[in-house]
């Protein structure tokens, strides 16, 4: 059986993107590669709407998180962490290690932190920045980034840092317009590229903040080291991940072909159809309806289903999903539905879940989930 990798990242990598990774590697000074890199950076800036810079360098989402923090905050600064789960919490240790004073405003898993609570907190003391995780992959909750940006913009000295690792290229993100100062992400989720590149947009205020910090302890992830290269990729600082840059360029070409706005709409449509189908099969979802992400669904098991066994059966039937994190380990599975997946994948996924339920001894009406999914997709046009 073919195995569809439907974990919330890495996501399926389509052939034309794979082909870019399989190309013969050239010198990083190769004029054709330099042009490809430059064109990619120009597209990334334009498409996500920043008047600042974008950095595309080898690394993962966690490194991008560290890059955002290291270039905007120093030891002793106050940071407000808005956390809706495991990945929001990741900023805590990351920042404490740098001597940054962190306050955390969290929510019960499955819910958002109310924007009014964030505003109240910002009035209490001077925060140099706020972090928010657009989609926390542990909970499947999407934060109201636009509203949070609006509130933060009332506080002159406070930068807005957004973790878009499980959101960018699927959930709408307009960097300047949403008053985001730093947006960070990776390639392995909604871009549908293999893991290995970190992408960080930095607006003018973030670049100014970096300058004001002087020399920072971090070396490889220093904006100042990379700025000259992002402006002119024929220059060298550290070797670019040539094949991954080509792969991302192909992903961006596919996004342009689809249209970024259409891509956002497709993700919304697919997610709502998949979520309706899962609920129709009797599952509850962890994320409350009004804050559900479009990139993944965090699906709570019904009575009598064993996590390890269920995911083993699902894999045998052809779909790989991820387990729950933290207190939800063993209690749910996480299903990614982002990137370059199509209707065939969507139908296969829900049909496979039905087969796995059947094999788990559940009284499932075969075809019910498929029916709901297809009706929802057709209804939405
Ligand atoms: N933030 C979020 C929201 C994530 O989902 C992840 C990865 N699952 C990360 C950060 C960390 O990214 P990486 O694993 O690429 O370091």
Image (cartoon, rainbow, N blue to C red):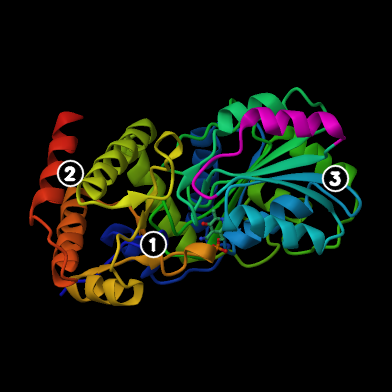
Per the rendered image, the range of residues in magenta is 109-126
Q: Quadrant of the C terminus?
A: top left
Q: Is residue 212 left or right of residue 323?
A: right
Furthest residue toward left:
366
- Image quadrant occupied by the N terminus: bottom left
Q: Secondary structure at mark 1?
A: strand
Q: Give the percent coordinates (x, y) of residue 146.
A: 57, 28
Q: Residues within 10 Å of mark 3 (few under 14, many from 20)?
A: many
Determine the image quadrant of residue 236.
Answer: bottom right
Element assignment for label 3: strand
Q: Nearer the viewer, mark 2 or mark 1?
A: 1
- How far apart are the alpha carbons under marks 3 and 2? 46 Å
For marks 1 and 3, the one nearer the N-term is 3
* Front residue (pair 87, 288): 288
Q: Which residue is mark 2?
A: 373
**Residue 293 appears at what percent x and percent y?**
42, 43
Tell me if mark 1 has few (under 14), some (14-19) or many (20+) residues whose alpha carbon lies within 10 angstroms of its own. Answer: many
Tell me the element at label 2: helix
Residue 169: quarter of image: top left
Q: Which residue is identified by label 1?
A: 332
Q: Is residue 31 left or right of residue 277?
A: right
Q: Position of residue 19 (x, y in %)?
A: 32, 64
| Left or right: 378 in relation to 74 | left
Identify the residue position indicated by label 3 in the image: 78
In front: label 1 or label 3: 1
Q: Earlier in the sequence, mark 2 or mark 1?
A: 1
User: Is the C-beta separation of discs 2 and 1 under 8 Å?
Assistant: no
């Amino acid at each position: 059986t073919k195995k569809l990798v439907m974990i919330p990242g890495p996501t399926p990598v389509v052939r034309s993107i794979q082909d870019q990774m399989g190309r013969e590697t050239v010198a990083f000074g190769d004029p054709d590669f330099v042009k490809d890199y430059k064109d990619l950076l120009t597209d990334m800036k334009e498409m996500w709407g920043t008047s600042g810079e974008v950095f595309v360098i080898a690394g993962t989402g966690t490194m991008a998180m560290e890059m955002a923090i290291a270039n905007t905050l120093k030891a002793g600064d106050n940071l407000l962490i808005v956390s809706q789960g495991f990945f929001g919490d990741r900023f805590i240790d990351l920042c404490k290690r740098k001597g940054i004073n962190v306050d955390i405003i969290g929510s019960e898993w499955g819910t958002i932190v109310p924007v009014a609570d964030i505003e109240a907190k910002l009035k209490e003391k001077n925060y140099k920045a706020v972090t928010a995780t657009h989609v926390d992959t542990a909970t499947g909750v999407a934060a109201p980034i636009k509203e949070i940006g609006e509130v933060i913009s009332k506080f002159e000295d406070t930068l807005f840092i957004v973790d878009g690792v499980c959101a960018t290229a699927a959930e709408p993100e307009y960097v300047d317009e949403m008053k985001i100062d730093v947006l960070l992400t990776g390639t392995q989720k909604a871009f549908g590229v293999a893991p290995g590149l970190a992408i960080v947009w930095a607006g003018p205020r973030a670049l100014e903040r970096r300058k004001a910090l002087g020399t920072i302890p971090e070396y490889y992830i220093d904006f100042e080291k990379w700025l000259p290269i992002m402006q002119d990729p024929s220059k060298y600082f550290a070797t670019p991940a040539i094949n991954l840059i080509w792969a991302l360029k192909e992903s961006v070409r596919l996004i342009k072909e689809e249209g970024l706005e259409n891509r956002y709409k497709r993700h919304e449509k697919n997610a709502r159809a998949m979520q309706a189908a899962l609920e129709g099969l009797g599952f509850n979802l962890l994320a409350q309806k009004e804050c559900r992400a479009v990139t993944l669904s965090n699906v709570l098991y019904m009575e009598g289903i064993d996590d390890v066994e269920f995911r083993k059966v699902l894999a045998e039937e052809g779909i790989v999903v991820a387990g729950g994190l933290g207190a939800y380990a063993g209690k749910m599975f996480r299903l990614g539905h982002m990137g370059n997946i199509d209707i065939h994948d969507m139908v296969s996924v829900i049909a496979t879940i039905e087969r796995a339920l059947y094999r788990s001894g559940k009284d499932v009406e075969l075809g019910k989930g498929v029916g709901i999914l297809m009706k929802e997709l057709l209804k939405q046009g």
